[in-house]
Image (tube, rainbow, N blue to C red):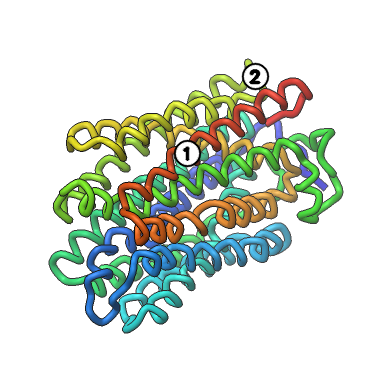
Amino acid sequence: MTAPAPAATSASARRGAAFALGVLAFVNLFNYLDRLIVAALVETLKKDPQLALSDVQLGFLATGFVVVYMLTAPVFGWLGDRRGRVRLIALGVAAWSLATAAAGLAWSFLTLFLARSAVGIGEAAFGTIAPALLADSFPKPSRGRVFSVFFAAIPIGSALGYVLGGLVDKHYGWRAAFTIAGVPGLLLAVLCLWIRDPPRGAMDSPQPPAHLDPGGRSYRALLTNPTYVLTVLGYAAYTFALGGMAFWMPAFLERQRGFSRADATVQFGAIIVVTGFLGTFGGGWLGDALLPRSKQAYLWVSGIATLAAAPLAFIAFRAGDHTTILLSLFLAEILMFASTGPVNSAIVNVVDPEMRASAVALSILSIHLLGDVPSPPLIGKLSDLSNLGTAVLVTPAAIVVSGAIWCAAALLGGKRGWAT
């Protein structure tokens, strides 16, 4: 049964919520650092004579992680709705950190593939449970901004993965890059144990929305929620594009456009940091600001911003001039990141509070199964058959599909009275 929303939260509860947001956002930074550091090492791994990897094998390093991540996410989603969330989060952080460090010991494609895949187990625990815990720590009208803070760690962590991976690889090799990236997570796992786990539904109305199944906890109930389903489908197309770009962009800049390895990783990382801040916070603020005017504000912001990003991404891949490439990429990434806070707010807002971890888990399973599981190896295969410059053009098309689905969901939801 959903707990009633209090008239006012105590000072200690507010401090606990702020502490949870700060710690989980910082942990999320290392989440994406460890996840994307392999993208900075692609060209080195390809040229290592002991590994001798093809582009499609390199793509499968990303896919192996995502497959494990999405398959274990529903398990942790189920546990997150029924067990103590803080311990599960801490366990996940420790697990993925150990797996990241272990990749530095790999001696073949198989051992590297297994180590990178194991990272997905720990990240599934964190990725499914942390958003649900935050939703129970803050009231609904502020969740767009809260999730913007939490998900702002994505561009920062991703950029640090590119920069750290590139610099450590240059001076000490790819094995040291994996080891250095993994160790700090063990300390963060201990810090997570100090987070307060609020009651489920503590910040929500006692009555769930009419179109939801208030008593159901099964994943089947989520599939009967039209707003949730459409939001996740759009998110899947978005993840296809973002996953492909995140993994292959440094290699594309070096191999196809003549950037040095250091410039490809550091400049792309710098773009991700700046655009991540501007886009993520801007999109979260705009979604919250427009929510009183439209119940579909989160979806409209996500859909329109994503559609606007598509032509800019296409220019970034087709331009030959370095300045044009970087400027187009900069603008495209701002618009892409603008949807991060709003779309995740929409996902947790349209389900019963006691099903939030399950909703996030099913979302993770779906967006990765249809998104960045196929995109890196597909781009790698297309690259092996033609060239990387042609292969990456599938990503702007996926961006268009994503924005169109979110706009359609917002339009249909407005006609039928669905709320996000």
Residue 229 x %, y % = 70, 42
**Quarter residue 217 falls in:** bottom right
**Quarter residue 323 falls in:** top left
**Mark closest to the chain's N terminus, 1 or 2:** 2
Please count the marks in the image: 2
Q: Secondary structure at mark 2?
A: loop
What is the CA distance from the residue labelled 1 to the residue labelled 2? 28 Å
Residue at 50%, 41% in the rendered image: 398
Mark 1 lies on residue? 397
Residue at 34%, 82% in the rendered image: 108
For marks 1 and 2, give the one nearer the viewer. 1
Mark 1 neighbour class, 10 Å CA radius: few under 14, some 14 to 19, many 20 or more: some
Residue 210 x %, y % = 84, 33
**Screen quadrant of the C terminus:** top right
Amino acid, disc 1? Ala
Amino acid, disc 2? Ser
Residue at 65%, 42% in the rendered image: 348
Mark 2 neighbour class, 10 Å CA radius: few under 14, some 14 to 19, many 20 or more: some
Q: Secondary structure at mark 1?
A: helix
Numbered label attached to residue 294: 2
Whether residue 18 appears in this view of the structure is: yes
Are the residues flagged by discs 1 and 2 in contact, CB closer than 8 Å?
Answer: no
